[in-house]
Amino acid sequence: MVAPRPPGPRSPTLEQVAEYAGVSRSTVSRVINQVSTVDPELREIVERAIEATGYVPNHAARSLVTRRTDSVALVVSEPAGREFAEPFLSRIFTDPYLGRITAGALEVLRPEGIHLVIMPADAPAHQQVLRYLRQGHVDGVLIISSHVADPLPQQLCDLHVPAVLSARPGRPLPMSYVDVEQQTGARLAAERFIALGRKHPATVCGPLDTTAGQDRLAGFRSALAVHGYAWVPAEPGDFTRAGGERAARTLLTAYPETDALFVANDLMAEGAMQALRDLGRRVPEDVAVVGFDDSVSALACRPQLTTIRQPLEEMAAEMARLLLARIREPEGRPRSVIFHPEIVERGSA
Protein backbone atom coordinates (compact mmCIF):
# COMPACT_ATOMS: atom_id res chain seq x y z
CA MET A 1 0.00 0.00 0.00
CA VAL A 2 1.37 3.44 -0.98
CA ALA A 3 1.79 5.81 1.95
CA PRO A 4 -0.05 9.16 1.82
CA ARG A 5 1.74 12.04 0.16
CA PRO A 6 3.65 14.18 2.64
CA PRO A 7 2.06 17.63 3.04
CA GLY A 8 3.89 20.74 1.86
CA PRO A 9 3.34 23.77 -0.32
CA ARG A 10 6.31 23.16 -2.61
CA SER A 11 7.10 20.32 -5.00
CA PRO A 12 9.17 17.60 -3.34
CA THR A 13 12.87 17.50 -4.08
CA LEU A 14 15.12 14.65 -5.15
CA GLU A 15 16.53 14.56 -1.62
CA GLN A 16 13.05 14.15 -0.11
CA VAL A 17 12.32 11.24 -2.45
CA ALA A 18 15.60 9.63 -1.43
CA GLU A 19 14.79 10.09 2.27
CA TYR A 20 11.29 8.68 1.79
CA ALA A 21 12.65 5.62 -0.05
CA GLY A 22 15.59 5.14 2.33
CA VAL A 23 18.14 5.27 -0.46
CA SER A 24 20.81 7.68 -1.66
CA ARG A 25 20.13 10.67 -3.87
CA SER A 26 22.27 9.14 -6.63
CA THR A 27 20.12 6.00 -6.64
CA VAL A 28 16.99 8.06 -7.18
CA SER A 29 18.75 9.94 -9.97
CA ARG A 30 19.76 6.68 -11.66
CA VAL A 31 16.19 5.42 -11.55
CA ILE A 32 14.81 8.66 -13.00
CA ASN A 33 17.43 8.56 -15.76
CA GLN A 34 16.48 4.95 -16.51
CA VAL A 35 19.94 3.51 -15.91
CA SER A 36 19.57 -0.17 -16.73
CA THR A 37 21.96 -1.45 -14.04
CA VAL A 38 19.72 -0.46 -11.11
CA ASP A 39 18.52 -3.47 -9.13
CA PRO A 40 14.84 -4.18 -10.02
CA GLU A 41 13.73 -4.32 -6.38
CA LEU A 42 15.48 -1.04 -5.62
CA ARG A 43 13.94 0.51 -8.73
CA GLU A 44 10.47 -0.50 -7.54
CA ILE A 45 11.07 1.06 -4.10
CA VAL A 46 12.16 4.34 -5.67
CA GLU A 47 9.26 4.38 -8.12
CA ARG A 48 6.82 3.91 -5.24
CA ALA A 49 8.48 6.77 -3.39
CA ILE A 50 8.18 8.99 -6.47
CA GLU A 51 4.49 8.17 -6.72
CA ALA A 52 3.90 8.70 -3.01
CA THR A 53 5.69 12.04 -2.84
CA GLY A 54 4.35 13.34 -6.11
CA TYR A 55 7.83 14.15 -7.34
CA VAL A 56 8.00 15.43 -10.94
CA PRO A 57 11.44 15.23 -12.58
CA ASN A 58 12.74 18.52 -13.93
CA HIS A 59 13.39 17.42 -17.50
CA ALA A 60 14.51 20.88 -18.57
CA ALA A 61 17.24 20.91 -15.93
CA ARG A 62 18.22 17.36 -16.76
CA SER A 63 18.48 18.23 -20.44
CA LEU A 64 20.99 20.98 -19.61
CA VAL A 65 23.19 18.38 -17.93
CA THR A 66 22.74 15.43 -20.30
CA ARG A 67 22.20 17.47 -23.49
CA ARG A 68 19.37 15.08 -24.28
CA THR A 69 15.75 15.93 -25.07
CA ASP A 70 14.35 12.38 -24.81
CA SER A 71 12.66 13.02 -28.16
CA VAL A 72 13.20 11.57 -31.61
CA ALA A 73 11.78 12.92 -34.88
CA LEU A 74 10.16 10.71 -37.49
CA VAL A 75 10.61 12.81 -40.63
CA VAL A 76 8.61 11.93 -43.74
CA SER A 77 10.68 13.63 -46.41
CA GLU A 78 9.49 14.58 -49.88
CA PRO A 79 11.80 16.60 -52.16
CA ALA A 80 10.60 19.22 -54.59
CA GLY A 81 9.88 18.60 -58.24
CA ARG A 82 7.53 15.60 -58.13
CA GLU A 83 3.81 15.46 -58.87
CA PHE A 84 1.42 13.13 -57.07
CA ALA A 85 -2.18 12.11 -57.57
CA GLU A 86 -2.95 13.07 -53.94
CA PRO A 87 -1.84 15.96 -51.64
CA PHE A 88 1.22 15.30 -49.46
CA LEU A 89 -0.44 15.44 -46.03
CA SER A 90 -3.34 13.32 -47.22
CA ARG A 91 -0.92 10.70 -48.53
CA ILE A 92 1.26 10.36 -45.49
CA PHE A 93 -1.56 10.18 -42.94
CA THR A 94 -3.71 7.73 -44.93
CA ASP A 95 -0.90 5.47 -46.16
CA PRO A 96 -0.76 2.34 -43.94
CA TYR A 97 3.03 2.38 -44.38
CA LEU A 98 3.46 5.30 -41.96
CA GLY A 99 1.23 3.74 -39.32
CA ARG A 100 3.22 0.52 -39.35
CA ILE A 101 6.55 2.36 -39.22
CA THR A 102 5.32 4.47 -36.28
CA ALA A 103 4.05 1.43 -34.38
CA GLY A 104 7.32 -0.45 -34.86
CA ALA A 105 9.47 2.49 -33.73
CA LEU A 106 7.34 3.12 -30.65
CA GLU A 107 7.77 -0.49 -29.53
CA VAL A 108 11.45 0.35 -28.95
CA LEU A 109 11.29 4.03 -28.00
CA ARG A 110 8.39 4.01 -25.53
CA PRO A 111 10.02 1.67 -22.96
CA GLU A 112 13.07 3.97 -23.07
CA GLY A 113 10.90 6.98 -22.18
CA ILE A 114 11.56 8.62 -25.55
CA HIS A 115 8.88 10.62 -27.34
CA LEU A 116 8.32 10.35 -31.09
CA VAL A 117 7.60 13.56 -33.01
CA ILE A 118 6.14 13.05 -36.51
CA MET A 119 7.29 15.76 -38.91
CA PRO A 120 6.09 15.99 -42.54
CA ALA A 121 8.88 17.53 -44.63
CA ASP A 122 7.57 18.29 -48.10
CA ALA A 123 9.25 21.01 -50.14
CA PRO A 124 7.46 24.01 -48.50
CA ALA A 125 8.30 22.78 -44.99
CA HIS A 126 11.78 21.42 -45.70
CA GLN A 127 13.80 24.38 -44.41
CA GLN A 128 11.55 24.75 -41.37
CA VAL A 129 12.05 21.09 -40.45
CA LEU A 130 15.80 21.31 -41.05
CA ARG A 131 16.02 24.40 -38.82
CA TYR A 132 14.10 22.59 -36.06
CA LEU A 133 16.47 19.62 -36.24
CA ARG A 134 19.55 21.85 -36.37
CA GLN A 135 18.47 23.65 -33.20
CA GLY A 136 18.68 20.43 -31.19
CA HIS A 137 15.02 19.97 -30.32
CA VAL A 138 15.41 16.19 -30.76
CA ASP A 139 18.20 13.72 -30.07
CA GLY A 140 18.02 12.03 -33.46
CA VAL A 141 16.00 11.44 -36.61
CA LEU A 142 14.30 8.50 -38.27
CA ILE A 143 13.98 9.45 -41.96
CA ILE A 144 11.35 7.98 -44.24
CA SER A 145 12.74 8.73 -47.67
CA SER A 146 13.99 6.70 -50.59
CA HIS A 147 14.20 9.55 -53.09
CA VAL A 148 17.59 9.66 -54.77
CA ALA A 149 17.58 13.47 -54.97
CA ASP A 150 16.46 14.12 -51.40
CA PRO A 151 19.04 16.49 -49.85
CA LEU A 152 17.97 15.90 -46.24
CA PRO A 153 20.10 12.80 -45.46
CA GLN A 154 23.28 14.55 -46.64
CA GLN A 155 22.34 17.71 -44.75
CA LEU A 156 21.92 15.75 -41.51
CA CYS A 157 25.28 14.07 -42.08
CA ASP A 158 26.88 17.49 -42.56
CA LEU A 159 25.28 18.70 -39.30
CA HIS A 160 26.33 15.53 -37.44
CA VAL A 161 22.73 14.87 -36.40
CA PRO A 162 22.24 11.17 -35.49
CA ALA A 163 19.91 9.72 -38.13
CA VAL A 164 18.78 6.41 -39.64
CA LEU A 165 17.21 5.95 -43.07
CA SER A 166 14.23 3.74 -43.91
CA ALA A 167 15.81 2.57 -47.18
CA ARG A 168 19.11 2.30 -48.98
CA PRO A 169 20.29 5.85 -49.71
CA GLY A 170 20.38 6.97 -53.32
CA ARG A 171 24.11 7.63 -53.02
CA PRO A 172 26.66 6.39 -50.48
CA LEU A 173 26.40 8.17 -47.11
CA PRO A 174 27.92 7.54 -43.65
CA MET A 175 24.44 6.88 -42.26
CA SER A 176 22.81 3.71 -40.95
CA TYR A 177 19.82 2.37 -42.84
CA VAL A 178 17.31 -0.47 -42.80
CA ASP A 179 15.88 -2.04 -45.95
CA VAL A 180 14.34 -5.18 -47.37
CA GLU A 181 15.82 -7.25 -50.21
CA GLN A 182 13.80 -5.33 -52.80
CA GLN A 183 14.95 -7.24 -55.86
CA THR A 184 14.39 -10.57 -54.14
CA GLY A 185 10.81 -9.55 -53.38
CA ALA A 186 10.18 -8.62 -57.01
CA ARG A 187 11.71 -11.91 -58.10
CA LEU A 188 9.20 -13.78 -55.92
CA ALA A 189 6.38 -12.01 -57.77
CA ALA A 190 7.86 -12.95 -61.16
CA GLU A 191 8.28 -16.57 -60.11
CA ARG A 192 4.65 -16.68 -58.98
CA PHE A 193 3.50 -15.60 -62.43
CA ILE A 194 5.75 -18.17 -64.12
CA ALA A 195 4.36 -20.91 -61.86
CA LEU A 196 0.82 -19.86 -62.82
CA GLY A 197 1.70 -20.14 -66.52
CA ARG A 198 1.09 -16.46 -67.32
CA LYS A 199 2.50 -15.34 -70.67
CA HIS A 200 2.22 -11.55 -70.74
CA PRO A 201 3.51 -10.05 -67.46
CA ALA A 202 3.75 -6.29 -66.87
CA THR A 203 4.34 -4.03 -63.89
CA VAL A 204 3.07 -0.83 -62.35
CA CYS A 205 6.42 0.10 -60.85
CA GLY A 206 7.21 2.65 -58.18
CA PRO A 207 8.64 6.13 -58.86
CA LEU A 208 11.92 5.73 -60.69
CA ASP A 209 13.56 8.46 -58.64
CA THR A 210 13.37 6.18 -55.58
CA THR A 211 15.64 3.30 -54.72
CA ALA A 212 12.62 1.07 -53.99
CA GLY A 213 11.07 1.86 -57.36
CA GLN A 214 14.33 1.19 -59.17
CA ASP A 215 15.14 -2.03 -57.32
CA ARG A 216 11.67 -3.58 -57.60
CA LEU A 217 11.54 -2.91 -61.34
CA ALA A 218 15.07 -4.24 -61.87
CA GLY A 219 14.37 -7.36 -59.81
CA PHE A 220 11.13 -8.13 -61.66
CA ARG A 221 12.67 -7.68 -65.09
CA SER A 222 15.85 -9.60 -64.33
CA ALA A 223 13.89 -12.55 -62.90
CA LEU A 224 11.73 -12.72 -66.03
CA ALA A 225 14.77 -12.36 -68.29
CA VAL A 226 15.92 -15.75 -67.03
CA HIS A 227 12.68 -17.16 -68.46
CA GLY A 228 13.16 -15.55 -71.87
CA TYR A 229 11.42 -12.22 -71.40
CA ALA A 230 13.75 -9.67 -72.98
CA TRP A 231 11.23 -6.86 -72.41
CA VAL A 232 8.57 -6.37 -69.73
CA PRO A 233 6.17 -3.40 -70.04
CA ALA A 234 6.24 -0.97 -67.10
CA GLU A 235 4.35 2.16 -66.10
CA PRO A 236 5.53 4.21 -63.09
CA GLY A 237 3.09 5.02 -60.31
CA ASP A 238 3.53 7.21 -57.26
CA PHE A 239 2.81 4.72 -54.44
CA THR A 240 -0.75 6.09 -53.98
CA ARG A 241 -4.05 4.36 -54.71
CA ALA A 242 -5.06 6.98 -57.29
CA GLY A 243 -1.61 6.80 -58.87
CA GLY A 244 -1.83 3.02 -59.15
CA GLU A 245 -5.25 3.21 -60.81
CA ARG A 246 -4.05 5.80 -63.28
CA ALA A 247 -0.86 3.88 -64.16
CA ALA A 248 -2.75 0.60 -64.58
CA ARG A 249 -5.22 2.19 -67.01
CA THR A 250 -2.35 3.56 -69.09
CA LEU A 251 -0.51 0.25 -69.08
CA LEU A 252 -3.54 -1.91 -69.91
CA THR A 253 -4.60 0.42 -72.72
CA ALA A 254 -1.15 0.13 -74.30
CA TYR A 255 -0.80 -3.63 -73.58
CA PRO A 256 -4.30 -5.15 -73.46
CA GLU A 257 -2.87 -8.68 -73.66
CA THR A 258 -1.43 -8.32 -70.13
CA ASP A 259 -2.39 -11.34 -68.02
CA ALA A 260 -0.13 -10.79 -64.97
CA LEU A 261 0.47 -7.50 -63.16
CA PHE A 262 3.10 -6.85 -60.49
CA VAL A 263 2.28 -3.63 -58.63
CA ALA A 264 5.08 -2.09 -56.58
CA ASN A 265 3.00 -1.53 -53.43
CA ASP A 266 -0.36 -2.67 -52.06
CA LEU A 267 -1.94 0.77 -52.11
CA MET A 268 -1.29 1.09 -55.84
CA ALA A 269 -2.46 -2.51 -56.33
CA GLU A 270 -5.79 -1.60 -54.77
CA GLY A 271 -6.14 1.17 -57.36
CA ALA A 272 -4.95 -1.10 -60.17
CA MET A 273 -7.61 -3.68 -59.33
CA GLN A 274 -10.24 -0.97 -59.56
CA ALA A 275 -8.95 -0.13 -63.04
CA LEU A 276 -9.15 -3.80 -64.01
CA ARG A 277 -12.77 -4.00 -62.86
CA ASP A 278 -13.65 -0.87 -64.80
CA LEU A 279 -12.08 -2.38 -67.91
CA GLY A 280 -14.03 -5.62 -67.49
CA ARG A 281 -10.98 -7.71 -66.57
CA ARG A 282 -11.41 -10.38 -63.90
CA VAL A 283 -8.86 -11.01 -61.15
CA PRO A 284 -7.26 -13.54 -61.18
CA GLU A 285 -8.98 -15.27 -64.13
CA ASP A 286 -7.96 -12.69 -66.74
CA VAL A 287 -5.16 -10.89 -64.92
CA ALA A 288 -3.23 -12.18 -61.90
CA VAL A 289 -2.11 -9.39 -59.54
CA VAL A 290 0.72 -9.35 -56.97
CA GLY A 291 1.45 -6.36 -54.73
CA PHE A 292 4.25 -5.46 -52.34
CA ASP A 293 4.13 -4.69 -48.57
CA ASP A 294 1.41 -6.97 -47.08
CA SER A 295 -0.48 -4.02 -45.62
CA VAL A 296 -4.14 -3.57 -44.67
CA SER A 297 -4.74 -2.58 -48.30
CA ALA A 298 -3.98 -6.17 -49.32
CA LEU A 299 -6.88 -7.38 -47.17
CA ALA A 300 -9.18 -4.62 -48.42
CA CYS A 301 -8.86 -5.80 -52.03
CA ARG A 302 -11.44 -8.11 -53.56
CA PRO A 303 -10.22 -10.74 -54.06
CA GLN A 304 -7.65 -10.33 -51.32
CA LEU A 305 -4.23 -9.49 -52.65
CA THR A 306 -1.32 -11.87 -53.08
CA THR A 307 1.63 -9.74 -52.05
CA ILE A 308 5.27 -9.61 -51.06
CA ARG A 309 5.57 -9.11 -47.33
CA GLN A 310 8.19 -6.79 -45.92
CA PRO A 311 8.16 -6.84 -42.09
CA LEU A 312 7.74 -3.08 -41.62
CA GLU A 313 7.15 -3.14 -37.86
CA GLU A 314 10.33 -5.16 -37.30
CA MET A 315 12.24 -2.92 -39.71
CA ALA A 316 11.09 0.22 -37.91
CA ALA A 317 12.00 -1.28 -34.55
CA GLU A 318 15.49 -1.97 -35.89
CA MET A 319 15.71 1.62 -37.15
CA ALA A 320 14.92 2.83 -33.63
CA ARG A 321 17.55 0.53 -32.10
CA LEU A 322 20.18 1.72 -34.57
CA LEU A 323 19.31 5.33 -33.81
CA LEU A 324 19.56 4.86 -30.05
CA ALA A 325 22.95 3.24 -30.55
CA ARG A 326 24.05 6.17 -32.70
CA ILE A 327 22.86 8.70 -30.11
CA ARG A 328 24.78 6.91 -27.36
CA GLU A 329 27.90 6.43 -29.50
CA PRO A 330 28.03 9.22 -32.13
CA GLU A 331 31.35 8.04 -33.52
CA GLY A 332 30.19 4.45 -33.99
CA ARG A 333 30.30 2.78 -37.40
CA PRO A 334 27.13 3.21 -39.51
CA ARG A 335 25.31 -0.08 -40.06
CA SER A 336 22.93 -1.52 -42.63
CA VAL A 337 20.34 -4.13 -41.70
CA ILE A 338 18.59 -5.92 -44.59
CA PHE A 339 15.43 -7.96 -44.03
CA HIS A 340 14.14 -10.88 -46.11
CA PRO A 341 10.81 -10.65 -47.96
CA GLU A 342 8.35 -13.50 -48.48
CA ILE A 343 5.33 -14.02 -50.67
CA VAL A 344 1.89 -14.21 -49.07
CA GLU A 345 -0.50 -16.04 -51.38
CA ARG A 346 -4.15 -14.97 -51.43
CA GLY A 347 -6.87 -14.82 -54.05
CA SER A 348 -5.46 -12.42 -56.65
CA ALA A 349 -2.69 -14.67 -57.96
Image (cartoon, rainbow, N blue to C red):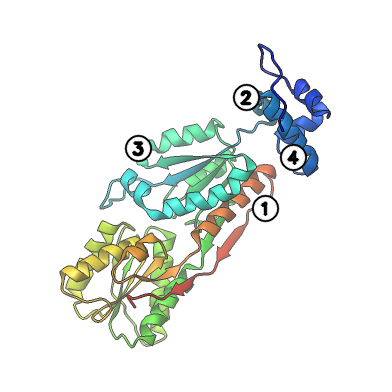
* Camera sees residue 51: yes
Q: Which residue is mark 2?
A: 60
Q: Nearer the viewer, mark 4 or mark 1?
A: 4
Q: CA distance from mark 3 to mark 2?
A: 31 Å
Q: CA distance from mark 4 to mark 1?
A: 24 Å
Q: CA distance from mark 3 to mark 4?
A: 40 Å
Within 10 angstroms of label 1, few (less than 14), some, or many (20 or more) residues? few
Q: Secondary structure at mark 2?
A: helix
Three-letter code, disc 3 = Pro
> Which badge, 3 or 2, is on the more N-terminal residue?
2
Q: Residue at x 43, y 67 (%)?
A: 215
Task: Tell me the quarter of the picture where residue 295 sits.
Answer: bottom left
Q: CA distance from mark 2 to mark 4?
A: 18 Å
Q: Which residue is mark 4?
A: 35
Three-letter code, disc 2 = Ala
Kindly indicate whether the residue at mark 2 contacts the one at mark 3 (C-beta within 8 angstroms).
no
Q: Nearer the viewer, mark 2 or mark 1?
A: 2
Q: Secondary structure at mark 4?
A: loop
Q: Which residue is mark 3?
A: 124
> Which badge, 2 or 1, is on the more N-terminal residue?
2
Q: Nearer the viewer, residue 346 or 249?
A: 346
